[in-house]
Image (cartoon, rainbow, N blue to C red):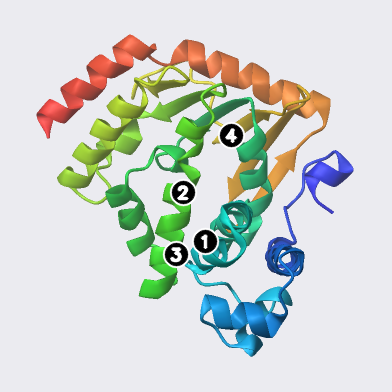
Amino acid sequence: MTADQDGSGGTAAGGEAELSDSLRTFGAVLKALREAGGLTQEEFAVRVGYSAAYVAKFEQGKRFPPENLPDRTSEVLGPVAGKVLAAAAKSLRRKAGLASWFLQWAGIEEEAITLYAYECRGIPGLLQPEGYIRAVFDRRLPPVTEEQLEREVAARLDRQQLLTQRPNTAFTFVVEQALLERRLGGAEATRNVIDHLLVVGSQRNVEIQVMPLRQEDHTGVDGQMYLAERPGHQWIGYVEGQRCSSLISAPNDVSVLLQRYGKLRSQALDCRATVSLLEQMRGAL
């Protein structure tokens, strides 16, 4: 049972099962679209250029669909069917590239009307340019295959579209200056991070604040935290550890996180001072 289910702290679980469920859901959508078009599996398979056995595996949720399947489906069943299948495939690809213990929070991110993030470990995933993402994954243990790396890089970049696709969602980030001083990936990667922060921070719905190296009244000693406001105005918190995560939904616990985050924002540099510091740091690289 997760924190979201029992109202207390706990480790999020069931990510792999959720991916299997998503594959079955994708298959059911494909089957419904095919049948609505009046085609048998064999007829549909011939028109999209795959074997009937291959299409059967898609519909049964036993095989990951190729990226061009929605386009081929659009040619056979029409643009609306293609768009429906593309949306289902996009969600599926996103889940496939994310850690199983992160999936539940990723879903909450997608519907949030307000998102707060405080990071003291690494640049928040929603703010990472591709070079930084690769630097993080290249150094992760145990090592991953090139195929896994590319899938996970693509999934993280795909998540970042939330910042532009949800212009009415307010995104606020507090990031430790130490993360930039560390220069993960080298000076060029750090320069790209700073440039990216400056560009993303100029969006109307995004605020980025840097927590200076010296802050005697620092409230973030308990570590990183994320908070999301759902469409029904319910707040939920999220924290991570080594290969695990916890959703926090009990009102008193969420209230504590909101208080701490509010204090952190008052202790960090404001947005203008943050821009000045980032420009100064970039010039020193």
**Looking at the image, is 21 positioned above or below residue 63?**
above
Where is residue 271 drawn, in percent x and y? 37, 13
Label 3: how many Cα within 10 Å (few below 14, some 14–19, many 20+): some
Indicate the secondary structure of the residue bearing disc 3. helix
Label 2: how many Cα within 10 Å (few below 14, some 14–19, many 20+): some
- Label 3: which residue? 151
In this rendering, the label closer to the viewer, 1 or 4: 1
Indicate the secondary structure of the residue bearing disc 2. helix
- Name the N-terminal-most of marks 2 and 3: 3
* Residues marked 2 and 1 touching at CB (< 8 Å): yes
* Residues marked 4 and 2 touching at CB (< 8 Å): no
Task: Identify which residue is drawn at 28% across, 38% down.
Answer: 193
- Name the N-terminal-most of marks 2 and 1: 1
Of 53 and 169, the residue lying toward us: 53
* Residues marked 4 and 3 touching at CB (< 8 Å): no
Q: Quadrant of the N terminus?
A: bottom right
- Name the N-terminal-most of marks 4 and 3: 3
Would residue 143 be visible to someone looking at this image?
no
- Label 1: which residue? 97
In this rendering, the label closer to the viewer, 4 or 2: 2
Please state which amino acid type lies under the numbered disc 3.
Arg
